[in-house]
Image (cartoon, rainbow, N blue to C red):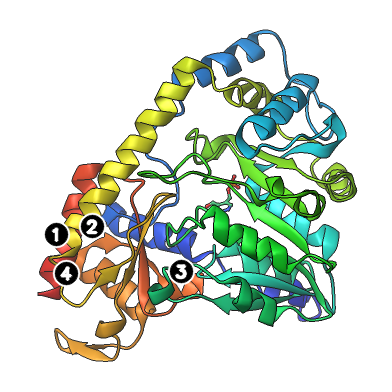
Amino acid sequence: MENLLLHQRVLQLSLSATLQMQARAKALKDQGISVVALSAGEPDFETPKVIVEAAKQALDKGVSRYTAVRGSDELIKAMQLKFLRDQKVSYGPLQVLSTVGAKSAIAMALESVAGPGDEVIVLAPFWVSYPEQVRLAGAKPIIVSASAEQNYIHTAAMIKAAITKNTRAIILNSPNNPTGAVFSEQVLREIMEVFVGTAVWVISDEIYEHLVFDEEKHVSPASFSPDAYARTVVISGASKGYAMTGWRIGVVGGPLAIVDAMVKLQQQRYSCIASISQAAAAFALQETPELKSEIEKMRGAYQTRRDEVMRMLKNLPGVTCIKPKGAFYAFLDFSKWMGKMHKGALIDNDDILAMRLLNEAHVAVVSGAAFGAPGCVRLSIASSLPDITEGMKRIQTWLE
Ligand SMILES: Cc1ncc(COP(=O)(O)O)c(C=O)c1O
């Protein structure tokens, strides 16, 4: 059996730190321990009833067949309207595609433009899957890190310095997982200017576009200029804003060439996304007034929870956090605790910190190293307010 080898491609792959932490928390819960799980990147809200109704009606109508690779006619129309309304960009029917979540869209976008010998710029702190997906495409992730002092916002100059003759793409993610940073229009414009005259694609992951707080506004870099439009592929979806993680709906809009390439990849891999999910997405993307108020309720709840985390943060000695302006995470900086003895054991790094918070304080968070930011932990605010308050209290008690 020794000759049955697995390929390096999978042997080198890391497991998702977020999913691992969820599994560990569940194992403790199964032993009867009360764990406050603040690790998951998924809404605690149910999918709004109006969307579920649309899916039920589709089922009753027998919508149970393969569709065109990019999606049903009604979903294509809904995606076009969505990109016009939210991203302020106009895409023809051949410039949009529905995918198995935003995750498969990012993977297919990367595979469409990068391969061995190529580089893809990934801005840290980053979503855990980006570097792994770049490697799966055969390319090399080039990590450009912004610090907490910079509010985790990268400057155009930092990005310019990372471009080489091998750079094929950059992944932008605003609002950001894990930091909650929202890149301002001005910063995004400056970043997009850097690429003028280059052959660099911009993969703009806008999955958290619905979740911006206070006076923040979501803007898509694809809308800035003809140059930006021609090099940007926009990726969004239903998972976060509509609380539909399990439905697996991603939406893509972009220049014909890259969308065509992604359609080819999808055709050979998945054929199309589930027809019932498509019917639900075609309805959801229209954002009827009733649905819009549901979306707003969820957004408001995340903002209240964010405020609670910021209020309770003052009780955590030596811990800081940049106020999240979007998405549903708080990225707590524990740098001052690294290398310190606490309760008779050394906190070597954030992995150990996250494990000790789980085992000793019974709070599940994800270590920052997985996001390219050692010394930090990510706390999800996509959990109920009482859970967040209890989780913060437990961390406080443990630190004291
Ligand atoms: C930044 C970012 N992009 C993409 C995704 C994937 O979303 P989906 O569930 O639609 O595949 C996630 C999910 O956690 C995310 O945080």
Tag 4: residue type? Leu
Question: Residue at horizontal 26%, vertical 56%?
Answer: 31
Mark pair 4, 1: CA separation: 9 Å
- Pointer 3: what residue? 152
Above or below residue 15? Residue 12 is below
Tag 1: residue type? Lys
Q: Secondary structure at mark 3?
A: loop
* Residue 325 horizontal side relative to residue 169, left or right: left
Label disc, if present, on residue 335 of the rendered structure: none
Above or below residue 113? Residue 373 is below
Tag 2: residue type? Met
- Pointer 1: what residue? 393
Tag 3: residue type? Tyr
Mark pair 4, 2: CA separation: 10 Å
Above or below residue 45? Residue 367 is below
Mark pair 1, 2: CA separation: 13 Å
Question: Residue at horizontal 49%, vertical 39%?
Answer: 210
Packing grade of label 1 (10 A; few <14, some 14-19, many >=20) is: some
- Of tags 4 and 1, the one toward the viewer is 4
Is residue 224 at all visible to an observer of this figure?
A: yes
- Of tags 4 and 2, the one toward the viewer is 2
- Pointer 2: what residue? 310
Q: Quadrant of the C terminus?
A: bottom left
* Residue 373 horizontal side relative to residue 154, left or right: left
Which callout, 4 or 2, points at the residue further toward the start of the chain? 2
The foreground one among 35 and 283 is 283
Packing grade of label 2 (10 A; few <14, some 14-19, many >=20) is: some
Packing grade of label 4 (10 A; few <14, some 14-19, many >=20) is: some
Which callout, 1 or 2, points at the residue further toward the start of the chain? 2
Which percent across, then down, holds residue 86?
A: 60, 35
Is residue 12 at all visible to an observer of this figure?
A: no
